[in-house]
Amino acid sequence: AVFLLVICSCCAILLGRLNDIIQYVFYTDSLTGLNNRNAFDTYLKNSGKRVLDDGVVCAAVTIANQPVINRQFGREEGDRLIRFFAQTLGESMAKTGAYLVYNGKAQFIAILEETDRTAVEHMLQRFRFVLDRRDFLKNAEILYEVGIAESGGDGARKMRALLSKTMS
């Protein structure tokens, strides 16, 4: 009876952790540890009908010359740069509870609620400061593009509209 109790307990623990494992495998980017495209699609689907209040900001950061970095310095250094962007963006926005996504093709997306464009611009300035002082790829020119849109100021009241304004 004790043996059966132990087996049942182990199965219950495993089943309890199974959802966490599935979430990690299917919704986490293996290179960056951030939410991946599948997670973002689910996020967009779940927030699609919600009307956004003022103070929701979407920011997109794309490494514009990632293919050049990969060719000139190797894929390992290119991946290191992507991980650096992920970590630095995460640290820059840590206190905001930002929903961060690595969307693939060297593109990062952040959804921040209860903030404004100016606060996000300050966070991205800190990001730029850290990027300029990186200790690797010092001889490489890192080109990146930034798009920012705010629900109130840009008139986007749905998440997809906000994302669209961010990308334009």
Image: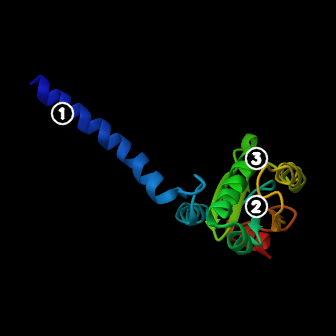
x and y, in percent, of residue 78 in the image: 67, 64
Which residue was labeled with disc 3?
93
Label 3 with label 1: CB-CB less than 8 Å: no
Image depth: mark 2 or mark 1 in front? 1
Q: Which residue type carries mark 1?
A: Ile
In the picture provided, is 14 more to the left or to the right than 76? left
Q: Residue at x 30, y 40 (%)?
A: 14
How packed is label 3: few (under 14 Cα within 10 Å), some, or many (20 or more)? Answer: many
Q: Quadrant of the N terminus?
A: top left
Query: Mark 3 to mark 2: distance in Å?
Result: 12 Å
x and y, in percent, of residue 62 in the image: 75, 67
Does residue 51 appear in the picture of this structure?
Answer: no
Q: How many marks?
A: 3
The disc placed on residue 7 is 1
Which residue was labeled with disc 2?
58
Between 70 and 14, the residue placed more toward the observer is 70
How packed is label 2: few (under 14 Cα within 10 Å), some, or many (20 or more)? Answer: many
Dot 3 or dot 1: first in sequence order is 1
Between 164 and 32, the residue placed more toward the observer is 32
x and y, in percent, of residue 142 in the image: 81, 65
Query: Mark 2 to mark 1: distance in Å?
Result: 47 Å
Q: Residue at x 12, y 27 (%)?
A: 3
Q: Quadrant of the C terminus?
A: bottom right
How packed is label 1: few (under 14 Cα within 10 Å), some, or many (20 or more)? Answer: few
Q: Which residue type carries mark 3?
A: Met
